[in-house]
Amino acid sequence: MQQSYRDSEVSIHPKPPVVWGHSFLATLEGLGVCVCGEQRLLLRAESLPAATRAAAAQALSACTAERQLFQGFAASTKPDKELQAIQEGIATAAYDILCPAVLACNSVQDLSDIRDTLLLEMAAVQSSNEDSAALLQKLYQLVMGLGAWLLQQIYPPVLHALQLVLLLQQQRIGESSSEGVSPAAAAAAAAAAAAAGTAAAAAADPFDAACSDVLAACLSSLDAAAKAVAAAKLPLLPLLLHAPAATPTTVEVTLMVSLFLIKNLIFLHDVLSSYESRFIKKERQIDFPGQQQQQQQQQQQQEQQQQEEQQQQEGESAAAQNLLLHRLQQQQQQQQQQEQQQEQQQEEFQNHNKSV
């Protein structure tokens, strides 16, 4: 069916229009050539972010060309199953090409640039009028995988740097303390505290632990950098460049580690904020199964409470009715006893009159 409408398109137009003249995207063989071109583009590219953007743009243009071809043949703006299958194939091929290349990258800067590039491409796809839902879904899937990989690349070095900052701070506090605590003891205490914090973070939820550690790292690194800049009375990095054999002081090492933390925490903030916004959006717009169960349980509890209240009210009303019936019975018995006493008195009075 797919080849037939393409053949009929060629027979209707013996001389192809200009819009299709320089493109093989109108045929399945042309799509294969497009996929091979994307692979060569990624292999030969000097800049992976630029190649990723070009590959995503090429996939979008392929989806657009297929849509235009289908509209020209079918004379209808409504998508068909064949067009949807072709666009899904293009999006899947683009994802299969981009995903291994992106996940093989270890550069934090390149990964961050690729993520920003894909977000821009997703915004372009959303703002376009073409039906590119399949490509948008695959790009979103690639962005989420890239964010997870970027988090794995950044988080361990930042955690180690944070532990180093804590050790240096404990060492500096131990050296300046009046109690004379040894630097080795301070370093051991800091290492134990860092290990305990790491174990607690591992036991907790990974997302919550990452957010907590990032917040603590931000506060610690900014505080350490401010103290180091205020305490340093000499140029730090130029001095190390001119005198590489010189041993850096604790202040210098703390400042350099803090600057490293601040740089990487910017990337971490972007990644975690995207995850957080995604979770908040889902929580506000989409009902999780757990939330549905909780709502059902709450509704059941409310219904049970209402039933218990109704039963209690019915029980109270029944008790009140029983009490009224008991009182009425007692009154009737008393009246009967009074009537019997009156009858006895009358009989005695009559008997007395007869005897007289």
Image (spheres, helix red, strand yellow):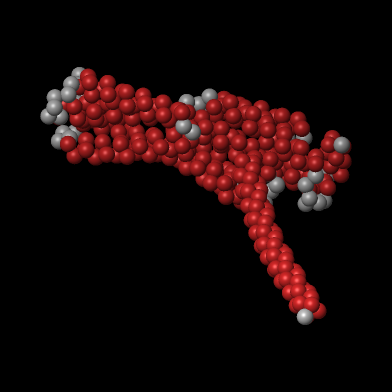
List the single residue furthest toward the left.
178
Instruction: Look at the image and tell me whether residue 136 can be seen.
Output: no
Front residue (pair 15, 132): 132
Left or right: residue 23 versus residue 270 is: right
Which quadrant of the view contains residue 44?
top right
Residue at point 18%, 27% (across, down): 174
Q: Quadrant of the N terminus?
A: top right
Percent of width and height locating residue 52: 56, 34
Disc count in the image?
0
Residue at point 41%, 29% (across, down): 200
Instruction: Look at the image and tell me whether residue 333 can be seen.
Output: yes
Front residue (pair 244, 42): 244
Percent of width and height locating residue 296: 65, 47
Percent of width and height locating residue 62: 69, 39
Up/down of 296 relative to 173, above or below:
below
Residue at point 58%, 45% (across, down): 282
Which quadrant of the view contains residue 101?
top right
Q: Quadrant of the C terminus?
A: bottom right
Percent of width and height locating residue 279: 54, 43
Front residue (pair 306, 148): 306
Residue at point 67%, 62% (across, down): 323
Left or right: residue 106 versus residue 306 is: left
Up/down of 188 relative to 271, above or below:
above
Up/down of 167 relative to 118, above or below:
above
Left or right: residue 113 versus residue 167 is: right
